Structure formats: C-alpha cells, structure tokens
Image (tube, helix red, strand yellow):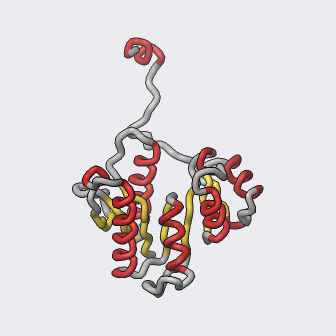
C-alpha cells in the first residue's frame, strides 16, 4: 500500500508534532508500507521516499511557500498512484478531497483521505473552522489523539464510525524516566 504524507516531515527537534510525523513515517515503512513524504533538503527518514521542497525561509512571503507546497504535492500525486493521502493540514486535506472526488483527475487508485486532529485548539470554529468542519466530515477516516477529541468531533457532525482514537506515543529510547535524585540534581 502506498501512503503519501502531505505534511512536511522534518528532523525531530523537540516538538511533539515533528517527532510524531517522523516516527509515523518510519514505523509505517517498517511495517511494509511504501511511504512517500514531503521533506526539506537533507531530511531522510529511514525507509521513506522523500520529495524535497525549499524551506519557508527561502521565500520572501509565506503565502508563496504555501502555494509552492501545494503545487509540489500535486506533482508528487500526479507522478504516483497513492492508496492513501494523509495530512493534518486543512489546505492539503481539501486538495486531497478534490483529488479523490475526481475534481482533479490525476490518480487512479486513491482509496482514502485520512485526517488527524491533534489538539483541542484546532477543533475551534475560528480560523479555517468552516473548511475544517467540511474536511472532517468528508474525510474517509479521522484520527483523534484522545477520547475527548473524538467526542467533540462527533458533536460537530463527524460520523463516529470514521473516527479512530490513537493516542500520541513516545519513543522510549529517547524519553525514559530518570530517578528523582538525578532530576533534582539536574535542576
């Protein structure tokens, strides 16, 4: 199965979301899936086919970076027949839904568009709320990281049968408990 992670994967650098995308791509690859992902130059997660884009800082205006990212996603989708498009980004998700509904006819095999919601702030109806609610309802599958987020999504009209709760995890090789004595001494 070919899966395209449309969000940009970066080296984990402390943020939960960068670590999550990195580990998701690597672990899906280890499980036998063919994973493709958008990355910045020199970012190469093990076992992942990468499609490099220029960093946001190289553009004078951030909206140009977003447009170029969308264009690059279209190029990658056009060049490959993916089974699943995965994102947490509303713009990328709407693009994925357009591709799936054949409004943009560039792929034959697309079976699912999967969206993940990671926090309660993103559930708000404020910034992009209308698009976000539309996208949640139209996606083939929705991943919620907590039961509470699932409950909120159901109240917002997302079919509960499409929602799977997959809690965030931690790489126990990177994050492991230390004794109270060591922790106090480090402070």
Q: Residue at x 63, y 63 (%)?
A: 136
**In the displayed structure image, the side of residue 160 where residue 127 appears, left or right:** left
Residue farthest right in this picture: 155
Residue 40 spot, x, y in % from top left: 28, 57
Judge whether 115 appears above or below 71 on screen.
above
- Name the image quarter holding residue 39: bottom left
**In the displayed structure image, the side of residue 141 where residue 82 appears, left or right:** left
Judge whether 3 appears above or below 44 on screen.
below
Residue 101 spot, x, y in % from top left: 57, 82
Q: Which residue is drawn at 58% across and 52% down?
A: 127
**In the displayed structure image, the side of residue 127 where residue 19 appears, left or right:** left
**In the displayed structure image, the side of residue 148 where residue 169 appears, left or right:** left
- Name the image quarter holding residue 156: bottom right
* Nearer-the-camera pick, 116 or 166: 116
Q: Which residue is drawn at 41% across and 48% down?
A: 18
Residue farthest left in this picture: 42
* Nearer-the-camera pick, 57 or 178: 57
Residue 168 spot, x, y in % from top left: 54, 47
Q: In which quarter of the image is the C terminus?
A: top left
């Amino acid at each position: 199965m070919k899966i395209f992670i449309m969000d940009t994967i970066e080296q984990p650098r402390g943020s939960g979301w960068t670590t999550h995308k990195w580990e998701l791509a690597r672990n899906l690859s280890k499980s036998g899936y063919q994973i493709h992902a958008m990355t910045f130059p020199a970012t190469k997660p093990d076992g992942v086919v990468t499609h490099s884009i220029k960093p946001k800082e190289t553009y004078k205006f951030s909206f140009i970076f977003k447009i170029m990212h969308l264009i690059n996603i279209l190029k990658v989708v056009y060049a490959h027949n993916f089974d699943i498009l995965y994102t947490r980004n509303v713009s990328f998700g709407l693009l994925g839904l357009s591709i799936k509904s054949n409004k943009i006819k560039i792929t034959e095999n697309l079976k699912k568009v999967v969206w993940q919601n990671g926090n309660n702030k993103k559930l708000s109806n404020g910034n992009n709320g209308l698009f976000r609610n539309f996208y949640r309802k139209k996606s083939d599958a929705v991943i919620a990281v907590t039961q509470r987020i699932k409950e909120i999504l159901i109240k917002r009209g997302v079919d509960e049968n499409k929602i799977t709760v997959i809690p965030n995890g931690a790489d126990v090789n990177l994050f492991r408990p230390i004794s109270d004595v060591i922790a106090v001494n480090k402070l």
